[in-house]
Amino acid sequence: MENINRYVLCKSNNGKELVYLNYNSSEGFKFKPKNQVKYNGIKVNKMVIINPSFIEKVLKRKVKRKLDLYLQFLINLLDDENEDPTTLTHALNDLDRYRRTIINKYRNYLDKKYVDLLLKKINLLEREIKEKLFLCMQKEIQPEEEFEQEHRRGR
């Protein structure tokens, strides 16, 4: 059997008090850190946050980064004239997946007003991507129609 060390980080300085937690039944936000920083210390595989205010801060920061990423992607798409419809559909699918993640996972930990605001922002981004996809599809269809009209005139 694998020897697993479990650690509890507490802000209070109570001395040498031992705290045992049941990780399976604890009601908190569970996630797996990316571990991108290399150092000679403890490697964290799984983390459970129990404090509601800390959960809210972590999730708001995470959501803000992701929305900024989508917004930057949308700005790059609007500036680019030679866009590919497949990248737009992938972005649309990814945005839909992210909306479902917010509804299913994050709604339990965030305020209702904040979740509604997030969903409105996502709807706005989705509408812009759909509009860009529609214009892109029209550009692809339009030259074929002109070609068909030229053949009809030649009869």
Image (spheres, helix red, strand yellow):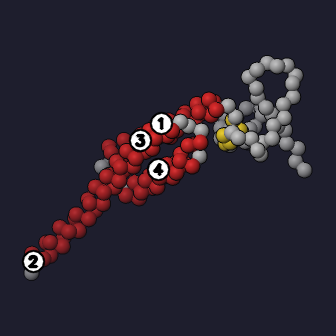
**CA gap, disc 1 to disc 2?**
62 Å
Query: Can see residue 87?
Result: no
Q: Amino acid at mark 4?
A: Leu
Q: Quadrant of the C terminus?
A: bottom left
Q: Of marks 4 and 2, which one's residue comes earlier in the chain?
A: 4
Q: Which mark is residue 155?
A: none
Instruction: Kindly report which numbered mark, 3 or 4, lies closer to the viewer in this rendering.
Output: 3
Mark 1 crowdedness (10 Å alpha carbons): few <14, some 14-19, many ≥20: few
Instruction: Kindly report which numbered mark, 3 or 2, lies closer to the viewer in this rendering.
Output: 3
Q: Of marks 3 and 4, which one's residue comes earlier in the chain?
A: 4
Mark 2 crowdedness (10 Å alpha carbons): few <14, some 14-19, many ≥20: few
Q: Which residue is mark 2?
A: 154
- Taking the spot 52% from the left edge, 51% from the top edge, the residue there is 100
Image position, residue 113 (x, y; %): 47, 36
Mark 3 crowdedness (10 Å alpha carbons): few <14, some 14-19, many ≥20: some
The quarter of the picture where residue 17 lies is top right
Instruction: Kindly report which numbered mark, 4 or 1, lies closer to the viewer in this rendering.
Output: 1
Q: Which mark is residue 95?
A: 4
**CA gap, disc 4 to disc 1?**
20 Å
Q: Which residue is mark 1?
A: 113
Q: Amino acid at mark 2?
A: Gly
